[in-house]
Amino acid sequence: MTEMTPTSRIFVAGHRGLVGSAVLRRLAALGYTNVLTATRDQLDLRDQAAVNYWFRANRPEFVYLVAGTVGGILANSTRPAEFIYDNMMIHATVVHSAHLFGAKKLLYLGSSCIYPRAAAQPMTEEALLTGPLEPTNESYAIAKIAGIKLCQAYRSQYGSRFISAMPTNLYGPNDNFDLTSSHVLPAMIRKFHDAKQEGARDVTIWGTGAPRREFLHVDDLADACVFLMQRYDDALQINVGTGEDLSIAELAETVKRVVHPDATIVYDRTKPDGSPRKLLDVTRLHALGWRHKISLADGIQSTYDWFLANHSIARGLAHSKGA
């Protein structure tokens, strides 16, 4: 168990994003009262000198490193330099400053895309670096792998209590619904919603619909992050997911039922599928005593409700780069 208390100084790096905002909600619900944040205008997490200055001034004891540049297949394939540069710099500056200024513990959040495209399913933590990555998000995956190795290196050389968690596909309030940069589930919600508003029946989904994916509500992930900060202290990255998956076609039908039941789904087979399957082995996490609570159907409904209530910002909401 860590010594994190309700008055501990806790820094959430990336507090305006999908994950960061959920971590803030979870910490507030649990009674943590000394949570530190910084917007992108206040602190560019890619700038080591600026991050050092901020850590020296604020001295966070616990760090949730959940900031980064993220997106779906289109964003990854068209902006690879941005994805690898931004993420590698953000991870490097925050981890180094946490070491320099005596943070007691840091949780670094990666992604399930770190595992090889052809990894055995479900993917165990030991699958890391055992084969080629999925080409459509290779730059992002390499940056995330570097983050894992960075935490492990600081543990090895300095004894730093830096841990890494690898979540599956995420969704929920504050997600990015911009069709040029969003992930598959929020993109589907947006597409079905727009079709409904326009009186259109056809909704086009990229690929064949055959790939299988696992989805975790971001509030469940936030709960897992706090749980792991308190209960996990190993060098090996730990998977965070539901242990359940479904096909993209099944996902599309689920979103259709919630958003636009009269729609007709059309698959654009000229577009890439990405990895054929991505399911995490969550045996280690389950053994620690944590399991997800929010079902996919309930999560999609609540996410669509949030989208409708925040429509003016949700349509173009993009994940921040370290803010």
Image (spheres, rainbow, N blue to C red):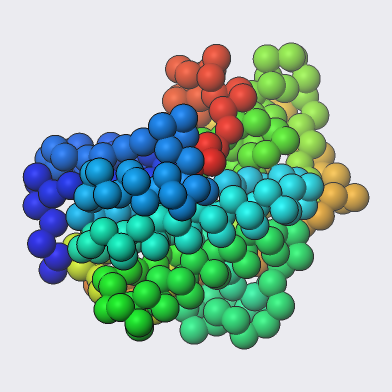
Above or below, 154 relative to 269: below
Locate residue 196 relative to residue 108 in the image: left or right: right
Locate residue 303 relative to residue 139 in the image: left or right: left
Dividing the image into 4 quarters, which one contains the N terminus? bottom left
Q: Nearer the viewer, residue 101 or 167?
A: 101
Corner quadrant of residue 155: bottom left
Q: Nearer the viewer, residue 168 or 321?
A: 321
Dividing the image into 4 quarters, which one contains the C terminus? top left
Which residue is found at the position 73% from the left and 53% from the top? 80
Above or below, 3 relative to 174: below
Res 222 seen here: no
* Image coordinates for residue 123, horizontal then vertical, percent: 53, 75
* Image coordinates for residue 89, horizontal then vertical, percent: 54, 55
Which residue is found at the position 39% from the left and 62% from the top? 96
Above or below, 307 relative to 63: above
Which residue is found at the position 62% from the left and 67% from the top? 142
Res 146 seen here: yes
* Image coordinates for residue 302, horizontal then vertical, percent: 42, 32
Q: Nearer the viewer, residue 209 or 18?
A: 18
Locate residue 264 relative to residue 146 in the image: left or right: right
Corner quadrant of residue 267: top right
